[in-house]
Every structure is written in C-alpha cells, then in structure tokens.
Image: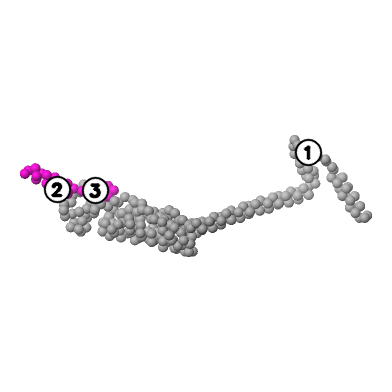
Amino acid sequence: MGWIVVFAIVVLFFTMVRVVNQYERKVVLTLGRFTGTLKPGLNLIIPFIQTTMNVDVREKAVDVPSQEAMTKDNISCTVNAVIYYRIKEDQVERAVLNVRNLDYAMTQFALTTMRNIVGQFELDELLAKREEAASKIKEIVDEKSDAWGVDVLSVELKDINLPDDLKRTIGKQAEAEREKRAKIITSEGELASAENLRQAARMLAEAPGALHLRTLQSINDISSDQSNTTIWMMPIEILDAIKGFGANFGKKN
C-alpha cells in the first residue's frame, strides 16, 4: 500500500512541475482564465486545475508571399516581403488570448498593408524608395499588431517584379539612354579636338617658323618608317612662285 502512495506522490509531483526554457514563456490558465505567466526555470502549477501554453519570445522571420499590386501610375507589379518580429516578454498573454494563429494573422495583414502602400507610390518612386515603402508598412503593421503583444523589428521588400513587356520597354529605354550619352561624349570629344586644331592653326599662323619646325618633325617621323616611301622636298618659295605665275597667266588670258 505504501508504494502506491509513493508512486501517486511522484506522479503528482511531475504533473505539477513545469520547466520553462530561456527563450520561451508559459501562459497559465486557471480553470480557463488567465492568471499569470511562468518565467524561465522550474515552476509549479496546480494539476488538473491549471494548464499552460508555450509562447516563443525569440525573433521570427515570416515571409509575406508575392502579391500583385497596382502602383499610383496604374502599373501592375508583383511584390513580396519578409517581416521580422518578436513577442514582447511582458505581453505574451496577448499572443495567446487575442489572436488564434499569430503568424497567419501577421502575414495576412502585411499583405493588405503592402498592397495599399504600393498604391501610394509611382513605379519609379517605388523602385528608388524601397526603404521608405518598407518603413511605412512596418509602421502600420506594428501599430496593428500591438494588440497581439508583437514588436515588429523591420520589414524588408525582397522583390519587385514587373511584367515582361514592361521589362522590355525599360530595357529599350535604358539602351537609348546609353546611346544618347555615348553620342554626347563623342560630340564633346570632337568639339574639344576641333578647338585644339583651331588653336594650333592660330599659333602656326602667328609664328611661321613653327610651321617649318613642325614640317621637319613630320619628315623625321616618316623617315624612321622602314617602308619604301619616297619623299620629295620642295621649298615653299617655289610653290609661292608657281602660284604667282599661275595667277599672272590667268589675268593675261
């Protein structure tokens, strides 16, 4: 008889003991009513009268599935995101008493919020200001989920996918922009080259001796070439005499 009593005491003891890990809390319900929270360590409850529910207080990452949304300038795009959140340690009972499936509730509310926020941005703004859009989503989701004892740490927009025809249009636009820049750079180079030639011509006109030196330098460069090029040198005075003779001959005729 004695061993039966000992066995009953041991069983009763184990039904009273609750071990809580460091990363979780246990919500205590007494006859179905919330009466407290068990903290990490060894805890005792009243068997058959009190029950416990585990709540993980570690940071969680929940994927928000792809959602088709319309931007402010009526362009359809597909957006997905990820939410990082944790349950507040001093409000763990809200995650049990105020919402049935916390992850599902967070995901669904984030979906609707994301669609509404995307509609406030034009496509170019959405692509350039992803962080601003994500910040607005975080602010709204955090405010709503406060009743669930949740602290939203951050919201990140993962992908913004565009329709194929729009991708091709953007690709053509980018290519046209690159060609435009290339033409501008080429024209600027040609303008600078023409300006340098103009300045060089002015300098040579002001200093005739410089033209002779440039001619000699060119002849020296050509002479170093190992090809069969033959160079005939003629004084400029002879050319001037030929030009003068041609002019006088034309007047006589």
Judging depth in this view, the residue of 68 and 238 nearest the camera is 68
Q: Are marks 3 and 1 in contact (CB under 8 Å)?
A: no
Task: Give the labeled residue for mark 3.
Answer: 20
Amino acid type of the residue tagged 2 in the rendering:
Leu
Tell me what residue is drawn at x 18 percent, y 54 percent. Answer: 50
The mark closer to the camera, 2 or 3, is 2
Task: Give the labeled residue for mark 1.
Answer: 229
> Could one spot residue 50 in this view of the protein?
yes
Tell me what residue is drawn at x 85 percent, y 43 percent. Answer: 235
Amino acid type of the residue tagged 3 in the rendering:
Val
* Label 1 packing within 10 angstroms: few (<14), some (14-19), many (20+): few
Q: Secondary structure at mark 1?
A: loop
Q: Position of residue 154 (x, y in %)?
A: 38, 54
> Could one spot residue 121 in this view of the protein?
no
Image side of residue 109 versus residue 232, left or right: left
Amino acid type of the residue tagged 1 in the rendering:
Thr
Range shown magenta: 1-25
Q: Position of residue 157 (x, y in %)?
A: 42, 55
Q: Earlier in the sequence, mark 2 or mark 3?
A: 2
Is residue 33 shown in magenta? no
The mark closer to the camera, 3 or 1, is 1
The alpha-carbon separation of the residues under discs 2 and 1 comes to 114 Å
The alpha-carbon separation of the residues under discs 3 and 1 comes to 98 Å
Task: Give the labeled residue for mark 2.
Answer: 12
